[in-house]
Image (cartoon, rainbow, N blue to C red):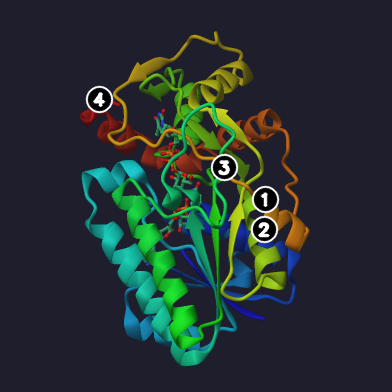
């Protein structure tokens, strides 16, 4: 099977490509990635001899057309992915997440390739703290940030192309991922690399906000379950029952590092900060028989800490610039 992976040099995409090469000897993988600040070719180094890498944008109609023409399956990860960046400058979010997805959809429509569109639980907005409510595939879209609204728009484009043009696509909306190769701008790697540097973790506001953490390998095994067995036109929510407050994540990391549980700082909150995400993955579990492998969050975090300790040369070059940017917004 010829698989085109967009955004394959980013966090989840690179893990997906590595996992695919390891577990699917029949897959012939091509990566299309623009290598923005978030993309890093070295994340594909362990499988470089098994992957064709194309440096380019998903907004480039001719390039996308020629790559999709040679693919049986397109797995679409490429996006601008960071909420804080979308508050500072929404423009690339509109271009990549909306125009880029449109460009891919048109190519898929022309060539009849199968598409799996990777999306986020943030399209549903947020839930109140301390309730049992969870997102389901029927929850109305209600995104809060420029990031999540452009992801919501991209999902709606996919749905329309399925209905109007018969494009063979599926969509997944996943919760917060953690694991190797995540950019140091994101919450977990930022705090892990701060702690490696002896710097106190930074918690937005009170730290009561809740995210539903899933290991990146579990996200990617769910993507393959959907590609293999999912129903065309369907939306699958991916989550591993990992609800944890930001404060508890920071305290767990402090414990892994053998530090005092109060050894962190509160910093300025994110404007419009979503309170809580929680996924009901019943459809994925019952219809497709998927289950997560990483069910012990503390153990998964400790393994992630080990990865960042062992791979400083991967994250170090980005760290100072990320921290300088956060300092400007008091975070
Ligand atoms: P990331 O920012 O780490 O990686 C994004 C990749 O896309 C980078 O390699 C970047 O160079 C590439 N890219 C950006 N613009 C591009 C363009 N115009 N053309 C081609 N490539 C481009 O993101 P991530 O965290 O790996 O997220 C991947 C996907 O998963 C995104 O669609 C995101 O919305 C979704 N998602 C992420 C999470 C999470 O917790 N990180 C959870 C659910 C869904
Ligand atoms: O829910 C899925 C989404 O998860 C994905 O769609 C996004 O691409 C991904 O970035 C992530 O979005 P979040 O905004 O939840 O992730 P982030 O890592 O930026 O922040 C996680 C939580 O931690 C959030 O409540 C904000 C908080 N935070 C973040 C940083 C960077 C802090 O308290 N301190 C920090 O330094």
Mark 3 is surrounded, within 10 Å at the Cα level, by few (under 14), some (14 to 19) or many (20 or more) other residues, namely some
Residue beneath label 4, please?
Answer: 330
Which one is earlier in the sequence, the residue at label 3 or at label 1?
Answer: 3
**How far is mark 4 from mark 1, CA to CA?**
34 Å
* Residue closest to the far right: 289
Q: Position of residue 271 (x, y in %)?
A: 27, 34
Q: What label sits on residue 218 in the rendered view? A: 1
Q: Quadrant of ligand 2?
A: top left
Q: What label sits on residue 266 in the rendered view? A: none
Q: What label sits on residue 222 in the rendered view? A: 2
Is the distance from the Cβ of mark 3 to the nearest ligand 2 atom less than 8 Å? no
Q: Is residue 95 left or right of residue 53?
A: left
Residue beneath label 3, please?
Answer: 134
Mark 2 falls on what kind of element?
A: helix
Mark 4 falls on what kind of element?
A: loop
Which one is earlier in the sequence, the residue at label 4 or at label 3?
Answer: 3
Mark 1 is surrounded, within 10 Å at the Cα level, by few (under 14), some (14 to 19) or many (20 or more) other residues, namely some
Q: Position of residue 216 (x, y in %)?
A: 61, 48
Q: Nearer the viewer, mark 3 or mark 2?
A: 3
* Residue at image location 43% in from the left, 40% down from the top: 126
Mark 3 falls on what kind of element?
A: loop
**How far is mark 2 from mark 1, CA to CA?**
6 Å
**Nearest the eye: 4 or 244:** 244
Mark 1 falls on what kind of element?
A: helix
**How far is mark 3 from mark 2, CA to CA?**
19 Å
Which one is earlier in the sequence, the residue at label 2 or at label 4?
Answer: 2
Q: Are marks 3 and 1 in contact (CB under 8 Å)?
A: no
């Amino acid at each position: 099977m010829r698989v085109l992976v967009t955004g394959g040099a980013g966090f989840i995409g690179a893990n997906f490509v590595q996992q695919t090469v390891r577990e699917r000897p029949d897959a012939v993988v091509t990566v299309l990635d623009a290598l923005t600040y978030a993309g890093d070719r070295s994340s594909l180094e362990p499988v470089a001899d098994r992957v064709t890498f194309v440096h380019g944008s998903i907004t480039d109609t001719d390039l996308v057309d020629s790559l999709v023409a040679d693919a049986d399956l397109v797995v679409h990860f490429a996006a601008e992915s960071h909420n804080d960046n979308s508050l500072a400058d929404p423009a690339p979010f509109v271009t990549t997440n909306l125009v880029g997805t449109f460009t891919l959809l048109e190519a898929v429509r022309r060539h009849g390739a199968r598409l799996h569109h990777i999306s986020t639980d943030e399209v549903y907005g947020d839930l109140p703290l301390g309730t049992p409510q969870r997102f389901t595939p029927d929850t109305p879209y209600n995104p809060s940030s420029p990031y999540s609204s452009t992801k919501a728009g991209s999902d709606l484009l996919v749905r329309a192309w399925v209905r109007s043009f018969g494009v063979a696509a599926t969509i997944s909306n996943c919760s917060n991922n953690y694991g190797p190769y995540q950019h140091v701008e994101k919450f977990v790697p930022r705090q892990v690399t701060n702690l490696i540097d002896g710097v106190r973790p930074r918690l937005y506001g009170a730290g009561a906000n809740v995210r539903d953490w899933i290991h990146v390998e579990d996200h990617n095994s769910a993507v393959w379950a959907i590609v293999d067995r999912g129903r065309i036109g369907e939306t699958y929510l991916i989550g591993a029952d990992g609800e944890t407050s930001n404060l508890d994540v920071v305290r767990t990391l402090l414990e892994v590092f053998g530090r005092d549980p109060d050894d962190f700082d509160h910093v300025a909150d994110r404007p419009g900060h979503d309170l809580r995400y929680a996924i009901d993955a019943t459809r994925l579990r019952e219809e497709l028989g998927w289950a997560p492998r990483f069910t012990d969050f503390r153990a998964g975090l400790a393994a992630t800490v080990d990865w960042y300790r062992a791979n400083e040369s991967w994250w170090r070059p980005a760290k100072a610039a990320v921290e300088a940017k956060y300092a400007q917004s008091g975070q």
